[in-house]
Image: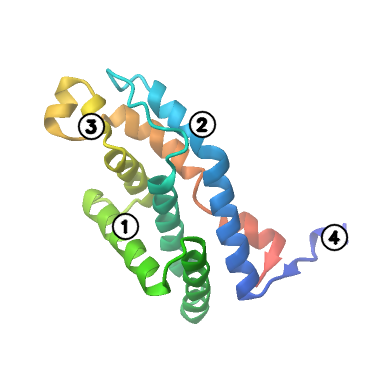
Amino acid sequence: MFGTFIKKKLTDNQLANIFINALFDSVDNGFSVIAQWINDDPAFVDSPKIDTSNNNEFALIVIVGNLSLIDSTFEASQAERVEKLIYEKLAKVYEMSEIDIRNIIKDYKAYINRINMPSKNMIYGMSKAVFYKYNLNEYQDEYFKRMQVPNPLFLKRMDEIMGNYLWNWDAFFKKYKI
């Protein structure tokens, strides 16, 4: 009974490690299923034939979506510390400088915001980013292809999937305290 009241205390560095490892683990283990799902989606006239190992764009979309939630989850000073640690760890993973990874993330965030305009819903933006980054327009029926917009039925299904890739901070804080 008392075990449910005891939360493990984490440092900002431990939080950043858990965050990065969990994101990459979910992308590495889930993208092949998502790629196959997209390839088989009835919204496409022809299968996009996305390579199940081509998860680079997807990983960056998931990272941006999750980083966008940090500011609303933590107080400003802690969010800044955690983000800095996350960028340091991402720089190591991608074998580049912290400035370069920050610029890539900034560009992806701007891209998602631009294609998602006027909506502020990050899940919807992530779904649209998957659509455009994987060039899925050319596989749609002629109507949506000409309009150069995703089929709304595809986006609705993609939103459900992308929702699973956003960090569940409520569940995390039930187990840990920072």
Q: Which residue is mark 3?
A: 137
Q: Choose mark 4 or mark 1, whichever is in front.
A: 1
Q: CA distance from mark 3 to mark 4?
A: 51 Å
Q: Which residue is mark 4?
A: 3
Q: Residue furthest front?
A: 95
Secondary structure beneath dot 4 equals helix
- The disc, 3 or 2, on the residue closer to the chain's N-terminal end is 2
Q: CA distance from mark 3 to mark 2?
A: 20 Å
Q: CA distance from mark 1 to mark 2?
A: 23 Å
Q: Residue furthest left?
A: 146
Secondary structure beneath dot 2 equals helix
Q: Amino acid at mark 2?
A: Val
Q: Choose mark 3 or mark 4, whichever is in front.
A: 3
- The disc, 1 or 2, on the residue closer to the chain's N-terminal end is 2
Secondary structure beneath dot 3 equals helix
Residue at (44, 62) in percent of width and height? 67
Q: Which residue is mark 1?
A: 108
Q: Amino acid at mark 1?
A: Tyr
Q: Which residue is mark 2?
A: 33
Q: CA distance from mark 4 to mark 2?
A: 36 Å
Answer above or below: position of 11 versus 104: below
Binning the other alpha carbons within 10 Å of mark 2 as few (below 14), some (14 to 19) or many (20 upward) gives few
- The disc, 4 or 1, on the residue closer to the chain's N-terminal end is 4
Q: CA distance from mark 4 to mark 1?
A: 41 Å
Binning the other alpha carbons within 10 Å of mark 3 as few (below 14), some (14 to 19) or many (20 upward) gives many
What number of labels is visible?
A: 4
Q: Are marks 4 and 2 in contact (CB under 8 Å)?
A: no
Secondary structure beneath dot 1 equals helix
Binning the other alpha carbons within 10 Å of mark 4 as few (below 14), some (14 to 19) or many (20 upward) gives few
